[in-house]
Amino acid sequence: MGINYSLNDNGVLEVVIDNPPVNALGIADTEQLANIFESVSANLDIKVAILTAVGKGFCAGVDIKEIENLPANEGILRINKACYNAFASVYECAVPVIVAVNDFCLGSGIGLAGAADIVIAAEGVQFGLPEVDNGALGALTHLTRLVPQQRARQMLYTCETAPAEELQRYGTIYEVVALRELLNSARLLAEKISRKPSKTIRAAKESANGIELLNIRNSYRFEQGFTYELNLAGEGEKARQAFIEGKRDTQSK
């Protein structure tokens, strides 16, 4: 359990989040995701990558209990660095990354999906940022790659979610399919990409990133600065304790 990955004969890397009960990502899990996607640059056998999950939830966000159990500000510092590296590693991965979202996609899940090249989702999947309820900020950068700016702000302020079908209307989700068809749809698309010249696809990925107007690293780092401020002000501590005491939705980041 945790993060599993495999590479097939056609050069398709599959990375699977398997961390029950809701696929919340601990610090080590998040760091491992960053290491996996960063390593793609040196492995020329990889032509395309799929990131997905099994069980309940694609990702419920970070492991709040782990953060709260670490001394002083260690948890916040470590998870923020891990998320920063993981989201950037997906966005900057040397090959296209397809994210196949099987269930709710919250917090860190938005960071991963919003950093990807292509998103496919199962019917009814909900996307959201519960950061305000957690006394933290972050991944609005990535949410605005999935929904329009004003919709993203409304979701940020209210912590309300948006269904996959809405995101498909914006054109940011490639397909919405039945859950039983999700992985097969991602694999079919990955196989189509894998048949293209590998060197050209890697150049295309670098080119696509190079012409994007939003600097993902700088924008997300700016957001994270407010998380540090809120944590020092005690807001993060209050929110994490409310979560641990069961006073908030267990699917929140």
Image (spheres, grey):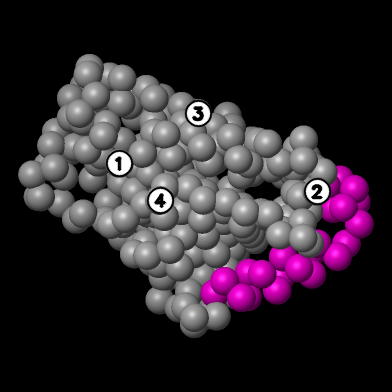
Above or below, 68 against 113 in this view is above
- Label 3 with label 2: CB-CB less than 8 Å: no
Residue picked out by circle 3: 221
Residue picked out by circle 2: 45
Q: Which residue occupies 54% across, 74% down?
A: 182
Instruction: Give the CA distance from mark 3 to mark 4.
Output: 30 Å
Q: State the image coordinates of residue 128 (x, y, percent, origin top left).
A: 38, 57
Does dot 3 land on a helix, a strand or a loop?
A: helix
Residue mark closest to the camera, 3 vs 1: 1
Side of 33 where 134 appears, left or right = left
Q: What span is in magenta?
A: 182-204
Residue 125 visible, this angle: yes
Prevalent SS, magenta region: helix
Residue 1, which numbered label? Answer: 4
Instruction: Give the CA distance from mark 1 to mark 4.
Output: 15 Å
Residue mark closest to the camera, 3 vs 2: 2
> Which tag, 3 or 1, sits closer to the chain's start?
1
